[in-house]
Image: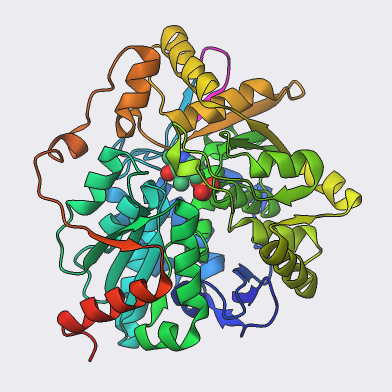
Amino acid sequence: MNYISTRGEAPILGFDAAVLAGLARDGGLYVPETWPQLDRADFATLARLSYAELAARIMAPFAGPHVSEAELAMLCDDAYRGFDAHPDPAPLRRLDDGLHLLELFHGPTLAFKDYALQVLGRLFDLVLARRGERITVVGATSGDTGSAAIEACRDRDTLDIFMLHPKGRVSEVQRRQMTTVLADNVHNIAIDGTFDDCQNLVKTLFVDTAFRDRYRLAAVNSINWARIAAQIVYYVHAALLLGADRRLAFVVPTGNFGNVFAAYGALRMGLPIETLVVATNSNDILARFFASGVMEIGTVHPTLSPSMDIQISSNFERYLFELQGRDAAQVALTMQHFRERGAFAVDPEILVQARQTFLAARCDDARTQDVIRDVYRQDGLLVDPHTAVGIAAARATPLPDGIDKICIATAHPAKFPDAVEAAAGIRPPLPERLAGLTGLPERCASLPADADALRRAIAGTLQTRGIMA
Ligand SMILES: *Cc1c(COP(=O)(O)O)cnc(C)c1O
């Protein structure tokens, strides 16, 4: 598969180069030249595969010819072996009201990010070892990407990882999951600012081609296509669990639009998805877009679901590219407008088209707490605040009869114990994976939201480690 930039001015790359590149050189995002097609006749065969085998099968057309299905099969087997709930790392659970939850918190850091990042870390190793190369991963996290990426990259000889998080704006569990990893190649940096500041810093470094080339920067954020490809897998998996003849709607708690874009990818590949419900917290830029056709940045409000406290959804550009008929020049223009004025609008007929697939609902903190309490009372189940935003959106969005609604349960409740306890009156028990975190020493640098300071920190660290002159 070849990869093209949403802005049309970057070189066309194969899978391995696209995975290493992250952001395209023109500031756009890499997307596959075509959408591989799932054949409905194959669904019976696919349903018999293990999760790891299915992952290799679904990712193979995206990864070939550089990475073969056999290589992917080995890599995925290794990646998902460490998940709980073995043999199915992504089980479905049905709530009392008929809503299905797809539990994506059985990986090492207890959020859905593990499902893609455990694969990506191993992909980096495979591709880099073959090329005899080394990279510097630079990422920004609103909480869960950071720990999942660090867990996937720690102790790998082929890379160093620098992870930026907004100081004081991630939960204590999230912070400790990152800062207690003392591996030599792992570097945590707390930034004085918001997640959007962190993400903008990362983007600034990536468009600085001199710096980017010198340090071989690579991305683990969902701008990396391998993450989207690996996330498409669990949508197919959920459909197979329910039976392939069903009509489906997925409800996805959304921040960066990565997870829900993977659902859109599954739709484009032929999964019988009728509706995608974008669930946002009070940082509702996406909900406002799907209501009005206007994308307009507001200010970021801290909420109970911090991994969605985002105003600029990077991955939306990939959807915009599809929505604007894959017209890269048009996308480049729209994004320029967005950068300069903090807003853009799409034509009314484009909005109509978007709303044929996407609906959106917003849920504030009070409602999030109500849902956590209600689900505990009705189903005896504790859900995390992000999942609760999804459940609220599912309940607020009526759909025609005969459509199965599946809400993505994006994190384990124990990652957000204070919010869950405040709402449900009971503290989620700490799973074994988190039990030892509290007493461990932490290591983390601290920087202002300033690109030069970040450049100096990265250069200095790699020099001290003897990796760069
Ligand atoms: C990352 C994250 C989200 C948002 O996912 P996006 O792909 O950024 O839309 C939602 N919930 C949790 C728990 C997360 O970690």
- Return the x and y of residue 239 as percentages of the image width and height: 58, 38
- The image position of residue 43, as x and y in percent, is 60, 45
Say above or below: 112 vs 350.
above
Residue 417 at what x, y percent from top left? 30, 27
For the question of whether residue 37 can be seen, the reply is: no
Residue at figure coordinates x 22%, y 69% from the top left: 156
Quarter that holds the N terminus: bottom right
The residue nearer to you, when weighing 370 against 44, is 370
Q: Nearer the viewer, residue 333 or 95?
A: 333
- For this orientation, the residue located farthest to the bottom is 469
> Is residue 370 highlighted in magenta?
no
Display colour scheme = rainbow
In this image, 177 relative to 148: left or right?
Answer: left
Q: Residue at x 86, y 44 (%)?
A: 352
Q: Main secondary structure of the magenta part?
A: loop
- Can see residue 207? yes
Magenta residues span 95-101
The structure residue drawn at horizontal position 62% and vertical position 26%, both measured from the top left corner, is 394
Task: Say which quarter of the image contains residue 411.
Answer: top left
Q: How many numbered dots are placed on residues in this image? A: 0
Is residue 98 left or right of 124 when viewed as pictured?
right
Residue under the image location 22 percent in, 76 percent down: 461
Most foreground residue, 448 or 203:
448
Percent of width and height locating residue 440:
10, 45
- Asked whether 187 or 247 is in front, the reply is 187
Q: Residue furthest right?
A: 349
